[in-house]
Amino acid sequence: MLETFGKSVKKLKSNNVSVKKYTNEIGWREFSHSLINYFPQMLKGNLRKEFDKFPWLNNSKFLNAWKKGMTGYPIVDAGMRELYETGWMHNRIRMVVGSFLVKHLRINWKEGEKYFRNCLLDFNEANNVAQWQWVAGCGADAAPYFRIFNPILQGEKFDKQGEYVKKWVPELSKVPPKFIHKPWEMEKKYQEAINTIIGANYPMPIVIHEKARADALSAFQSIKKKN
C-alpha cells in the first residue's frame, strides 16, 4: 500500500509546496511507527533513559490552566482552546504549546500526550508519542531540551496581527497588535479604556518566560551531571 502511495506522489508536481508538506508528514508518520515498532518502550516511557531522572513538577494548577487555555500567554491559550473546541491545531502551535508544558511548566510530557490523545481527531498513537518525546527532548532525533520556544516571539512571528489569537481568545479582541502577544504590558488606563483588564478579564502569565527558561535549563543540567 505504501509503495503504491509513493508512486502516486511521484506523479504530482514536485514544486507544489502542499504536496511536499503532505509527503513530509507521511514520512514522519512512518518514522514514528518504525520507532515504536523497534522501541515499544517509548509508549510508556522515555527513549533517552537519562530523562528518567528529570525533575518534572507535579503542579495540577498549572496543568489545568494549560488545558483550559488560561496560561496568560495568548498564542498558547489560543492553541489549547482550538484543540478543545475542534480536535485539531496546526503543527507549529502543537510545538509551541508542547514546549510550554514541558519546559516553561516542567510538567511531564506524558500529561500532554494523554491530553492530546483524548482531544485530537487526527490522533495517531505513534505520531503522538514520538512528537511529544521530540519536543520534550527525550525521544529519537529530539529537539535539544535547551531549545525553548519563547511564546511571545512565536506569536509575533506567526500571528503578527493577532488574528488567530483573537479568534480563539475573544476576550482579547480589542487589544491592538502591538500588545496582543504580551497584553500585560499595556498601561492600566488603556486596559480600562478597552475594558480588557489583565488579571481580571484575562489572566496574567502563570510563569515569567525568562525565569521559567532559566529554571528549565537548570533542571536539564542536573540530569547531565548525574550521567
Image: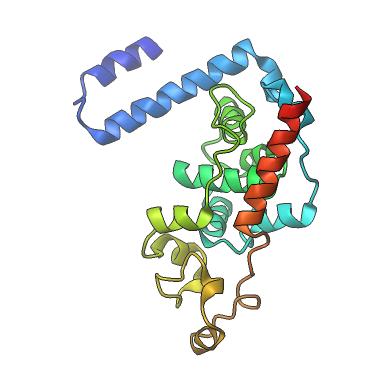
* Depth check, front residue: 137 or 41: 137
**Picture quarter with the C terminus:** top right
Q: Residue at x 62, y 29 (%)?
A: 129
* Depth check, front residue: 149 or 41: 149
Q: Residue at x 61, y 59 (%)?
A: 69
Question: Does any portion of residue 111 appear in the rendered image?
Answer: no
With 53 as the anchor, is 76 left or right in this view?
Answer: left
Q: Residue at x 64, y 70 (%)?
A: 203
For residue 28, above or below residue 178:
above
* Depth check, front residue: 41 or 108: 108
Residue reaching furthest to the front: 225
* Residue 84 image position (x, y, % from top left): 58, 53
**Picture quarter with the N terminus:** top left
Asked where in the image residue 65 lies, by quadrant, the reply is: bottom right
* Residue 208 image position (x, y, % from top left): 64, 60
Q: How many marks?
A: 0
Question: Does any portion of residue 8 appear in the rendered image?
Answer: yes
* Residue 95 image position (x, y, % from top left): 52, 42
For residue 59, above or below residue 147:
below
For residue 186, above or below residue 152:
below
* Colour scheme of the picture: rainbow
* Residue 37 image position (x, y, % from top left): 60, 13
Q: Residue at x 45, y 78 (%)?
A: 174
